[in-house]
Image (cartoon, grey):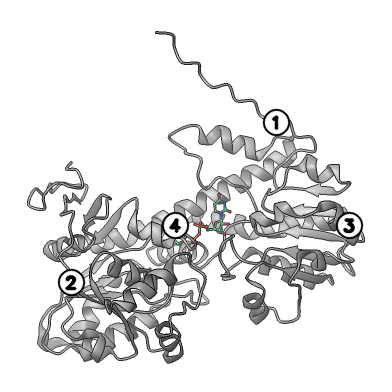
Amino acid sequence: MLGATAPLSQLNTGAHGDRVGRRDRVRPSSICVVGAGHVGLVTAACLAELGHRVTCVDTDEGRIETLRSGTVPFHEPGLETLIERHCASDVLKFTTSYKEALEGVDFIFVAVNTPSTPEGAADLRYIRRAVRQIGRALKDSRPIIVNKSTAPVGTAETVDHILRQEAGSLGELPVVSNPEFLREGTAIKDFMKPDRVVLGSHDREAARRVAELYGPVEAPVLITDPETAEMIKYASNAFLATKISFINEIASICEGVGADVSQVAQGMGLDKRIGPQFLRAGIGYGGSCLPKDVKALAHMAGLYGSHPQLLNAVLQINVDQRRRLVHRLRQTLGSVEGATVAVLGLAYKPDTDDVRDSPAIDIIRLLDNEGATVRAHDPVANQNLAEILPDVTYCSDPYDAVNGCDAVIIATEWPQFLDLDLEQVKARMRRPVLVDGRNLFHPDVVRGYGFTYLGIGRPDHLEEPLVLEPQPKEA
Ligand code: UDX
């Protein structure tokens, strides 16, 4: 295997895909990014940061206007600064015109969304539409088409097929699958310092040219066929989701046997083969990727005659986590009918205003179905949730949210909730019950204020772990 900085000519072709040594300086290219959503904008801004000339095209005129005025329509740390800087130096442009965006480009990145269909499949409508537009707008240039949208195995083929239909006179255009592994909140860092870059294409030369775009990014590049690259994306997200559902199942067992899941996760994570990440028990994963990607992979498995029992269990456990929480609250209160419940934290994780597939939505719906009144608060996501659940009372202040409540549920682990004055919270509530859906608080601290505390997978009496580090050996 070659190091990431070995020259491009030294390629090692093996059964496990190519690891490519790359140049550490960028040769500036002209790039079009299709789609000004989360992935598209981060990709466009970061490619500009790497030294390329980038035009980002989206058919949503309002969004393009907003971006031209220097505003990013969602919360992503560092993105606005990058966009401002590169727009000011004219390296990054925004347009609604495919014709303008494709003028003389060497690469076209497709970064449009692939929502779930009611059956759980990935909906390819936006990819098809974008590729058709590209095919029609291309005149005589032959750029490399790079697909960043998360799409089922076989999508590179579909893209190729549409291009032949729409831009047949240009002959076959190279298509490369380049899945993204960007987390909301750290997307810029994830792009600039990724663990790996995955490229899938039958055209190895095209894949190597895409690898060169990443120039100074210090990460191994894995080049495979397109089907394998597309599968790497799904398998990675499904594995992360599996880790979360696994620890959530362990948490339920912990509740039965009286063990503490946080310490179980700590003990497991010290094993380097397991690792500590994605072992935080809670009310399950949400967001725009994990839920839809696990469903899409399970759906794909079914199409090819497999019974994806593990994936189905991962999905089921994720739904059950929310139900279990409401069940435990029902047991504690006797009934939730007629109760008033505060839900603190509406985003699917902290540091984002994104509420897509947020566990808080399911919890509020379950409470509402059982006749409870919900008062909700999130530091930044109130407005986004109000568009989905307009009948909830939204409070700009957490103390206001808990007024007269029979229970408060922590649904997102916003760190500022740790600074809440629990004395004041308790004084405002009708019954002091705190349901910690993210194990944010120390149970003894909360109980010390006179609350009934319900965490995820935590015993009634928590004993702190004791870690004895090995002593350095004497010389
Ligand atoms: C995820 C993937 O991490 C990223 O690689 C992919 O490209 C997009 O999907 P993201 O959705 O931004 O990124 O969030 P992530 O930080 O992965 O968290 C996903 C969900 O899992 C959140 O709801 C989070 O609260 C939950 N989670 C995460 C847990 O419940 N426990 C954990 O230990 C970790």
At 71% from the left edge and 51% from the top edge, which residue is drawn?
418
Vertical placement of 160 versus 100: above or below? above
Question: Dividing the image into 4 quarters, which one contains the N terminus?
Answer: top left
Q: Quadrant of residue 158?
A: bottom left
* Type of amino acid at the residue the image marks with label 1: Glu
Residue 408 drawn at (x, y percent): 80, 59
User: Mark number for residue 333?
Assistant: 3
For marks 2 and 3, the one nearer the N-term is 2
Secondary element at tag 2: loop
Q: CA distance from mark 3 to mark 1?
A: 29 Å
Secondary element at tag 1: loop
User: Mark number for residue 29?
Assistant: 2
Secondary element at tag 3: helix
Q: CA distance from mark 1 to mark 2?
A: 55 Å
User: Mark number for residue 464?
Assistant: 1
The answer to whether residue 320 shows anywhere in this view is yes
Q: CA distance from mark 2 to mark 3?
A: 62 Å
User: Mark number for residue 374?
Assistant: none
- Mark 2 vs 4: CB contact within 8 A: no
Distance from mark 3 CB to nearest ligand 1 atom below 8 Å:
no
Nearest the camera: 319 or 468? 468
* Type of amino acid at the residue the image marks with label 2: Ser
Count neighbours of disc 1 (C-alpha within 10 A) and say few if under 14, some if 14 to 19, many if 20 or more. few
- Frontmost of labels 2 and 4 is 2
Residue 118 drawn at (x, y percent): 53, 77
- Mark 2 vs 3: CB contact within 8 A: no
